[in-house]
Image (cartoon, rainbow, N blue to C red):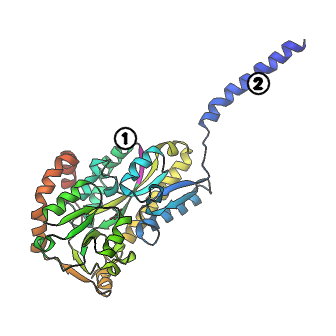
């Protein structure tokens, strides 16, 4: 009677196994550490946002999800325009990325780089916090990442080492470093400048050596990277584009977490995004824009354009806007224009 009994046991064991297997397949499996890619570290609002996100995630998940920051896109040797592909492929687990750096893969993200689309912060908010923002998140979701929250790099003001820029003619022949999609090459070519594409990692030595004359970046980056020390002595406040940041997680990684932990990561991203946006706007939204005084104190000439002077830049770049509208998606751009026209100040 031993044999049947053994068989019975085996059957019971097998049954237990088949019951256990589906549960095991679904059981969340956590990595010891998750890799977050960023262009800039915690000395900048961008990287600070990453640090805040990581800390909040750790706290909200009781340490189940540990995130390590990789500023300088160091997982890809600084190649910021490959970040989105690497994220999708799982080389990177999560990221806070600029719309500019991901626009070569996601054409809709060029929306924010269309010259003079967004006249003020209320216009950025009208897009990211409204229907347009939802549409862009849907697009990202379909592209294989899970978008969670918006942050902000900021309005990209023009700087150079040669002279004050007040008119498009002042840009003539200036070698300007840009990054992202060919939209930036078109914009600066239309203005008579000589644009050249390079990563942020390559850009700083190029300013120092004089290989390039100028660049465009938010003032929070200008000050934290001390661009005045690499000959960037002239800034023009033209507010031609602003790049939001987007908090995302690789889809497989997302699906490997429990629903409760996913929600914790999402909430942490939303809170960190809010705090990061406040840091990115600091000194630029208060009366008198104190950051400009601070920068002038560094020996930098800050040129503010009259509405008429600014209009000359708008006019010179309008053909670029018109050319890119169908490439970005005419429906999306129309929706953005409408949302901006209806914005609350
Ligand atoms: O490379 C830049 O200019 C930066 C840091 O602003 C971005 O990553 C878009």
How crowded pointer 2 is (Cα within 10 Å; few <14, some 14-19, many 20+) is rated as: few
- Residue 184's x, y, as percent? 23, 59
- Residue 183's x, y, as percent? 22, 55
Tell me the quarter of the image containing the N terminus: top right
Callout 2: SS: helix
Q: Is residue 116 visible?
A: no
Displayed quadrant of residue 305: bottom left
225 vs 12, left or right, is: left
For mark 1, what is the residue?
A: 142
Give the extent of the magenta segment.
Answer: 142-148
Q: CA distance from mark 1 to mark 2?
A: 42 Å
250 vs 153, left or right, is: right
- The number of callouts visible is 2
Q: Is mark 1 within 8 Å of ligand 1?
A: no
- Residue 33's x, y, as percent? 58, 54
Foreground residue among 219 and 163 = 163
Q: On screen, 258 above or below 246?
A: above
């Amino acid at each position: 009677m031993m044999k049947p009994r053994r068989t019975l046991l085996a059957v019971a064991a097998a049954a237990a196994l088949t019951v256990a297997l589906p549960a095991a397949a679904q059981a969340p499996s956590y990595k010891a550490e998750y890799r977050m890619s960023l262009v800039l570290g915690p000395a900048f609002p961008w990287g600070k946002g990453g640090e805040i996100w990581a800390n909040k995630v750790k706290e909200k998940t009781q340490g189940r999800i540990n995130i390590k920051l990789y500023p300088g896109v160091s997982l890809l040797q600084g190649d910021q325009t490959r970040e989105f592909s690497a994220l999708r492929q799982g080389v990177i687990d999560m990221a806070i990325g600029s719309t500019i750096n991901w626009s070569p893969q996601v054409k809709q993200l060029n929306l924010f780089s269309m010259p003079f689309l967004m006249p003020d912060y209320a216009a950025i908010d009208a897009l990211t916090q409204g229907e347009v923002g939802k549409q862009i998140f849907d697009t990202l979701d379909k592209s294989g990442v899970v978008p969670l929250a918006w942050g902000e790099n900021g309005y990209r003001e023009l700087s150079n080492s040669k002279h004050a820029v007040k008119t498009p003619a002042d840009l003539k022949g200036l070698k300007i470093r840009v990054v992202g999609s060919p939209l930036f090459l078109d914009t600066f070519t239309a203005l008579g400048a000589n644009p050249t594409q390079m990563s942020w990692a390559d850009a700083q030595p190029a300013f120092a050596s004089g290989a390039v004359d100028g660049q465009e970046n938010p003032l929070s980056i200008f000050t934290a990277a001390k661009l005045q020390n690499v000959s960037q002595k002239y800034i023009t406040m033209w507010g031609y584009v602003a790049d939001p940041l987007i908090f995302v997680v690789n889809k497989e990684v997302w699906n490997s977490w429990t629903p409760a932990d996913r929600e914790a990561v999402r909430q942490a991203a939303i809170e960190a995004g809010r705090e990061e946006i406040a840091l990115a706007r600091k000194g630029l939204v208060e009366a008198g824009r104190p950051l400009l005084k601070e920068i002038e104190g560094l020996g930098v000439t800050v040129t503010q354009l009259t509405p008429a002077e600014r209009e000359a830049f708008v006019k010179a770049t309008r053909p670029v806007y018109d050319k890119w509208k169908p490439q970005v998606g005419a429906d999306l751009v129309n929706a953005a224009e409408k949302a901006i026209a209806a914005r609350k100040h």
